[in-house]
Amino acid sequence: MTFDEIIDYRGQHSQKWDMMEPSFGVSPDDGLAMWVADMDFRPPEAMIRRVQEVASKGIFTYFGDSAEYNRSIQWWMKTRHGWDVDEKAIFTTHGIVNAVSMCLEAFSKPGDGVVIFTPVYHAFARVVRANDRQLVECPLALRDGVYAMDFDAWGAMMTGNEKIAILCSPHNPGGRVWTREELQGIADFAKRHDLILISDEIHHDLVFPGQKHITMPLVDPSISDRLIVLTATSKTFNVAGMHCGNAIIHDEKLRAAFAKRLGQLSISPNSMSMHMTPALYSPEGAEWVDACNAYLEANHHVFLDGINAIPGLRMMPMQSTYLAWVDFAGTGMTQDEYSARVARDAKIAASPGPVFGKGGESCLRFNIAMPRVQIEDAVGRMQRAFGDLQ
Ligand SMILES: Cc1ncc(COP(=O)(O)O)c(C=O)c1O
């Protein structure tokens, strides 16, 4: 297992590499793709072997018997997160954004308010709007240079029309691993304002050594009747193109409403992801992700030191994920100016901050899940592109 290997993703239908020229004007020939949240790492061999075995037998039938799949999820959640998952609580979706969207349909109606804590993963706002729900952006506070909860301010914003809150835990794009106290605050907020809580924990495995993610059900069992937890192998193991996610719902009433929506849409998982998941949620998968986290943490230090050495740029220190959040406010440049320097001069495709909602206006998000030499290269490009500020 090496994360140093440079894999050529160009011309392979990788959105991150093959769509960066049309999206940012950055050529994949000499540019770096640091936007879409895929890693440039080869997934665990156990999964590749499993998919090859299935493909070589030529068996692509309708999939039957999800016992092994469910057992692997239960094993992973217990051994990695100390969480007992009931088999009946597991619903498999077409990825996590699909699960969020189905939750909106199952647990609210058009016009209802849906709270998100911004800046946050941009697809939340997209699906809230697409489902004709009212988007309620509650901005995170900045304390000591990192994001923090702001319950008093958020409480004052509630009108009674809000029905759902979506939490991103750990946090994309800030890289925070929320503490037990912060998560308890979210649970209390949900209870106080009578909100269904969707806890999107897709990044739960990608926490740096020494950090501890606490899954929401372990924070406060009393919110089980209003809680949906979303998890997936996709970010953990770099297999997002398989579009397989899980909504884990322990409450029977919530389960019935979600099952109804799944049934109406007739959604069922593709067979490859059913084969792939047990190979990933395995001791070999665990070893891979531990090594990956150590590698990502080292990448984070290289990028943090390099970016923060540029006057006017401020990268938020991370505890998790591989998504680095850089604030350009200190440069005094407009969004167009600093974005052009990053795309045109540094030849780096990075995600624009405003799509993450309130608080993201002066930021760009950089994906640092790449071989170390490319991270060093990215730092050099950024230092040259903003060299006049030195
Ligand atoms: C918090 C969060 N949720 C969901 C997703 C995407 O999930 P999916 O591709 O399974 O829809 C991402 C991707 O970056 C994410 O960061």
Image (tube, rainbow, N blue to C red):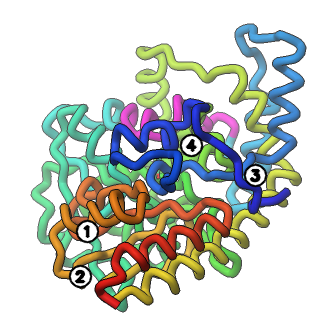
> Is there a contact, CB below 8 Å, between mark 2 and mark 1?
yes
10 Å crowding of disc 4: few (<14), some (14-19), many (20+): many
Describe residue 252's horizontal placement relative to residue 71 as left or right: left
> Is there a contact, CB below 8 Å, between mark 2 and mark 3?
no
Question: Is residue 60 positioned above or below 114 on the image?
Answer: above
Please give the residue where the numbered disc 2 appears in the rendered image. 331
> Is there a contact, CB below 8 Å, between mark 2 and mark 4?
no
Please give the residue where the numbered disc 3 appears in the rendered image. 76
The magenta span reads 87-103
**Front of the two marks 1 and 3:** 1
Earlier in the chain: of badge 4 and badge 3, it is 3
Describe residue 188's horizontal placement relative to residue 14 as left or right: left
Residue at 50% in and 65% down: 170
Q: Amino acid at mark 4?
A: Ile
Residue 148 appearing in the image: no
Question: Is residue 37 positioned above or below 256 on the image?
Answer: below
Earlier in the chain: of badge 1 and badge 4, it is 4
**Front of the two marks 1 and 4:** 1
Please give the residue where the numbered disc 4 appears in the rendered image. 248
Q: Secondary structure at mark 4?
A: strand
Q: CA distance from mark 2 to mark 4?
A: 44 Å
Earlier in the chain: of badge 2 and badge 3, it is 3
